[in-house]
Image (spheres, rainbow, N blue to C red):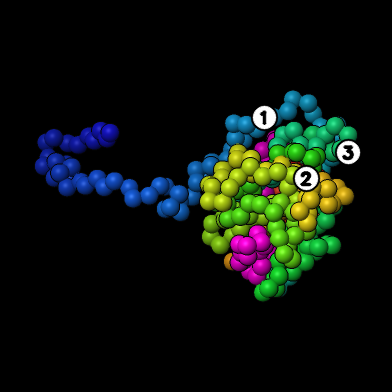
Amino acid sequence: MYRIFYNTESNLGLDIIQGLNFILPQGDLSSLGLRQAEDALYDAPPWDWQIDSQKPADESLMGESRRQGSSPQPQAYTPPGCVDFPTWKFLQTQWAWNANGGGTGLPRGWSTAGPSYFHERFHKGCNRPTRLNDYYALDHPLKEWDIVYPPASGTVLYAGWAGGGWASLGRVVIIDLGGGYWAMAAHLRGINVHVGQHVWLSTVIGWAGRSGHYQDNYWPSVHLHQGLYKDAHLASWAGGIYGGHSAQPVKVHYFGNGGGDYWYIQPRQLMSW
């Protein structure tokens, strides 16, 4: 129902009202490709994120992380074929307030950018046409069954075991973030979404694990393998990404411990939920 006010002393308002036509929508709002409100208004965490009243054990590490994330840092070199994720598109850290802690060696709600960082170990390739380009992929240590969120809202392109030459990624969720940008979460212990589903910042897409080659205990440590891609292609039969460009995460938002943004992420940097 609409209530419209107009000046009754003028025929102009009445003419406008009489000229209005209301047409029933032919699809849902997601088909319009509009920017989601949750991406634009992220000054508070979603309802199911709670700020833990227990402070992290190492206050000096927390302070260092705040200093690293509080202001932009220049990036000296971006390899040919790689791109930076645009700062106008929202990104967030992908774990919850209760990640890690309890004997993991990390304060609760915190993880790190590594063990494997950009261009380390299997994180290779900027724009190889027939292979996964994971130069800017990051591994984030987590506990098994820690919650994994999407890096931004989007639509699920693939959810399941990776096969073929991508099988070492284990269970993966691939999300279309819009504008040609995709995200992948790999090595999951379980998956909580399906293809075609729209996911929000607070959607649990899965849980952290160490899966690979169709088994749950393939990798020696539990971690979230997180990659971003531009204009890539999907081998839908195997859940594999190839071609396109590896995208560097830039201005990654965190909600906990005062909130803020990690601009250019440093090796093994401590990062808050």
How packed mark 1 is, by other alpha carbons closer than 10 Å (few <14, some 14-19, many 20 or more), is few
Secondary structure at badge 3 equals loop
Q: Which residue is mark 2?
A: 209
Q: Earlier in the sequence, mark 3 or mark 1?
A: 1
Q: Amino acid at mark 2?
A: Gly
**Image: magenta residue range:** 232-258
Picture coordinates of residue 196, whole percent (x, y): 53, 51
Q: CA distance from mark 2 to mark 3?
A: 17 Å
Secondary structure at badge 2 equals loop
For image coordinates 14% across by 41% down, the residue present is 14
How packed mark 3 is, by other alpha carbons closer than 10 Å (few <14, some 14-19, many 20 or more), is few
Please identify the quadrant where the C terminus is shown. top right
Residue 118 as seen in the image, left or right of residue 2: right
Q: Which residue is mark 1?
A: 50
Secondary structure at badge 1 equals loop
| Pick the front one: 232 or 47 | 232
Q: Which residue is mark 3?
A: 105
How packed mark 2 is, by other alpha carbons closer than 10 Å (few <14, some 14-19, many 20 or more), is many
Q: Nearer the viewer, mark 2 or mark 3?
A: 2
Is 158 magenta? The answer is no
Please identify the quadrant where the N terminus is shown. top left
Q: Nearer the viewer, mark 1 or mark 2?
A: 2
